Amino acid sequence: MEKVIGIDLGTTNSCVAIVENGTPTVISNRGGYKTTPSMIAVTEAGKRLVGHIAKRQAITNAENTVSAAKRLIGRKWTSPQVKNTVATSSYRIVEGPHQDVRIALREKDYSVPEISAMVLQEMKVIAEDYLGQPVTKAVITVPAYFNDNQRQATKDAGEIAGLEVIRIINEPTAAALSYGFGRPVEKTVAVYDFGGGTFDISILEIAPNGVFKVIATAGDTFLGGEDVDARVVDWLVQGFKAEHDIDLRQDRMALQRLKDAAEKAKCELSGTVETEINLPFIISSGRSEALHLQRALSRATLEELTLDLVERTIDICRQTLEDARLAKDEIEEVLLVGGMTRMPKVQESVQGFFEREPSKGVHPDEVVALGAAIQASALVDEKHDMILLDVTPHALGIMTFGSYFEELIPQNTTVPTNRQKIFTTSRDNQTAVKILVMQGEHEKAEDTDVLGEFILTGLRRAAKGQVEIEVTFEINADGIVSVRAKDLETALEQSIQVTATSGLTRDEIKQMMDNAKDDLVDRRVSEEFEGFRQEAQKLSADIERLLPQVEQIVASSDFGRDAIDKARSMLAKTQQAVERKDAAALKEQLEALARTQRMFKGVVAKTH
Amino acid sequence: MFRSRLRDGASHSHIVTDASRIPRLLPLPAGKLLRDYPLGPIDGYLISRVDGQASVADLIAMTGLTEPVVSASLDKLVELKLATCERASVAPKTPPATASSPRIEAVKTKPVSEQPAARRRSSTGDLRRDDLKPPRALYDPSEIDEDVDLDRALRQRILDVFHGLEALDYYALLGIPAAADKKSIKRAYYALATEYHPDKFFGKRLGSFKSKMEAVFGRMTLAHDTLTRRDLREDYDRYLDDRSKTEKHEASQRAPIAATATVLMPASPEPPTDAASARAAADDAAPKLTVSDQSRRDAFARRLVGSRHAHAPPAPAAPITHSIDPDALRRHYEDRVSGARDRVIAGHLTAAEAALERDDAAAAASACRQALELTPPTHDLRPALESVLAAATTELGESYRRQAAFQEKSALWKDAAKSWANAVKCLPDDAAAHDRAAAALLKANGNLHEAAQLATRAAKLSPDSVTCRVTLAQIYVAAGLNLNAKRELEAALLLAPGDATVVQLLKHVGK
């Protein structure tokens, strides 16, 4: 059976896991790390870097290094969150052809799913290396509060990376799956997931027969560790400005250094109560004099700077508990997920709110990927009896006359589900009606997201309010929304499957997929070449080292001189192949090189 | 609609649904008297008829009580250890503890067609999925032959539930008793989730079964979500209760007063089919009731009629003399007939009062109407009967009102319109009910003429109500009678100057 991997595509870090022989396992990357930074970069030479390497060179190549692309995925160019990111990011964000967002790296504009695809492809490669076989299917997690456009964009990213995304699941739900896996508990749990870019809270019921039912979920897709870092950066920038009257934000490289330092300080303050931020030569002043930044940050100050962010998460928890119609004491377990939950203030606030010590049983960085792998295995492996019942995080409805949003499927409805409502025409003799499918919690349609639209035509002519149209919304088990509109009198019916817009067309996705595949091939080839090159150079070095001795020993015989000449030409050919980056030619030389090396070694050994 | 009135016991494991079972009285424990038990007149009456020979079906026929009433009462007797209730084929000595499993067999072996949907009940403690199968004829049998990766038994199960969704109430759908607590509702739902959720068959060819499973599962979720929330469950229970009451009422109206003929022949040796006639017949033909029972009942009847009526107990039948006086014989016969009739009427009244007391308005109304058929215009009991009937009818009307309100809330406009129409029949002077009935009919795209009549009546009943006028105006607009609408709206504007809705509608009509 084909292996299906689970990927936690995080804002700052990503993680891949698989269920092997019934045990969910996180797969380490080549560096031995269980998580990989969700960063990509393009070097001056046009080389693409992903993960730790990209992170390491971020400061020297700030403008061409992308981090936290997840904060942009599936969003419109005009959205306030994009505006916010444009203002603070060290890379260039531009408007795409479909009101979408593109990221300009070197000479090329990349769509956000394309950037995410590079990270996903890296995760795919990590899994393939570990399994020793190709991987083509995955379950990918997204924040529970992602809307359908963001989910679709994530799916597209998977497709571009050459992965069939068999299911998108919510991160907190995945965490709960991992928690409940293999233990027949009957519990109501709250999952508090405060990650790099997003915050989610989900309340679930775990039934002993392996059914996981989400009761309520909510969150903020723009609230995470990044915002905490940003507060520290602000604090540093303001302090620097007060001291030197220089705005460090104007310098992208300085900004990237500040971000790094802020993140590092934040992490350190989870363990200590004070840390020093020391950034020498952060910028040169107008008088071409280098300036340094040096400031001490205490845990108390950090907590003060970010108090409102933590409070916001608690407010969302309170609201969600209310939506779930549960009292605090009905929550039997609180799981902490995401890096931000390492912050002592966060733990304290969560414990204070739920009046319960959070569970220590799950690893905040790995639990989501493990849950995704568990869901993947439950779907494809018949032996599993696990069923996940998730909810719609946002209400679904249509836009009605006067730009009002009329809800059909409320927030927190278990899927699969279907609901209908009857609507009437709003103008006399109206023969067509446009059904705009919307998602969101606001009364005014303009504040909600448009998922799709279609037009029901051929209505009978009548006074307004006379023609009745029954609109049915359906969400199937795969999360696909379909909408049906029916003229009740004529039984005329039209329906669409609503495909949320990720901001990319099918053709674009196809093109990006091919590019990504080519890139992977290039990368595989260059990796292969690199392997040959290393081996060939090692052998060449050995031969060169032995050459004078061997020459001395065999100088008397013709045969020997011949062999020496041969070896010399072999070394030259190898050098040429390396310069031409010709992997095939290099491979050809390898065997001869190895033979010569063995022979030389033998000759030298015999004489001594 | 399939629920018994009893909700209070998961302990009702030997509930009597199999009509072929034979109830049997158990001896009272030493020192205990029957009157120490919490019984009602219906129970007493049933006890008097349980003879170890009559089956449940016989009892229903004999007493003229409805099946749920008899079952409920027998359940109570079984629970109180006053009686056992065993299947006919089982030896009488078999302890009742084994009763629940044979019951299931009995249900299984019964042809489906013999189980009219309205009679099946979900309130029994140990309901199995077999009980839930709607009649097979409801769907095209070729549906099961669709080429999908599901075994035939499962396909069958999915189709049965899918096509039965509309007929199954939430309890039946989840296969739980009406008294089930939150925990068992959840258990049942979670167990069904692993059976009907399409993810269980991910990657398999499911064809049209996928959407069917989704529909089934979606409804199960709705059932779970409704029944596990106290407020929603209360609403839903009330709705079911009202629905079963009103359905009973509608059924009794469709088949009215079949027993009249028998009643008028008190000495008929045939087994009587109506509660009161059974009583009457029993008095004459099958002297099983003791004299004290009879006098107690008569006394009860007198008490009901009230002391202001000096309703004399029917003169004790003159002893049959051997003198052959035709007049005396005729008098004797007429006395017996009128005496029997009065007893029948009093019996109906008793039953009606009792029904009203236990909140069964449909039975009360039915009993009253039966009695009124027999009651001469000047009869002493007539005013009492009429007042009970009025009370029962109002109660029924309220049932319909609640039912309609629930249906409106669930956007079931057509059903709501029907319920409202029934409600106004019971509440002919209720302006609000007429108004809502009209509005529901309008929303359900129903007969506008009827809607207009209802709305007109509402406006007449409550001439100062703006709402009623607005509804009427909306109906006129829908019917294209803008002038009439304008008239109503102008009247409404006089009642409530500046009312935003009225002003807006007027603007629309004016165009």
Image (cartoon, rainbow, N blue to C red):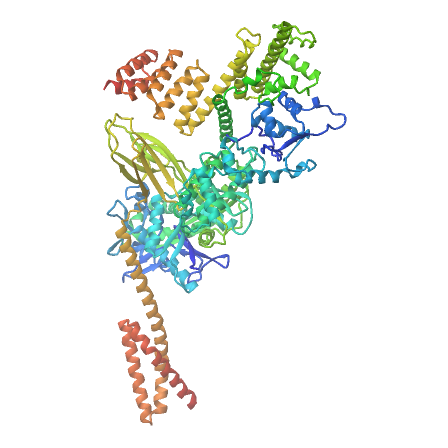
Could you say where residue B239 lies in the image, as x and y percent from the top left? 49, 27
**Outermost residue toward the front?**
B324
The residue most toward the bottom is A556
How many numbered markers are drawn? 0
**Residue at 66% over, 29% down:** B53
Left or right of A97 in this view: A239: right
Where B469 falls versus A273 (above or below)? above
Q: Residue at x 49, y 52 (%)?
A: A384
> Residue B237: percent from the left, percent from the top?
51, 29
Q: Quadrant of the C terminus of chain B?
A: top left
How far from the left and from the top, in percent, is residue B298? Answer: 65, 13
Query: Residue A16 at what x, y percent from top left?
Result: 43, 56
Asked if residue A50 shows in the view, the reply is: yes
Which quadrant would residue A451 be assigned to in this image? Answer: top left
Hey, which residue is sitting farthest right in the picture? B30
Q: Nearer the viewer, residue B501 or B65?
A: B65
Report if residue A216 is visible in the image. Answer: no
| Residue B332 or residue B446, whichever sits in front | B332
Q: Nearer the viewer, residue A264 or B446?
A: B446
- Residue at image position (53%, 33%) is B120
Q: Is residue A487 left or right of residue B5?
A: left
- The vertical placement of A32 against B284, above or below, is below
Horizontal side of A46 relative to B188 (left or right) equals: left
A529 to the left or right of B39:
left
Nearer to us in this view, A463 or A35: A463
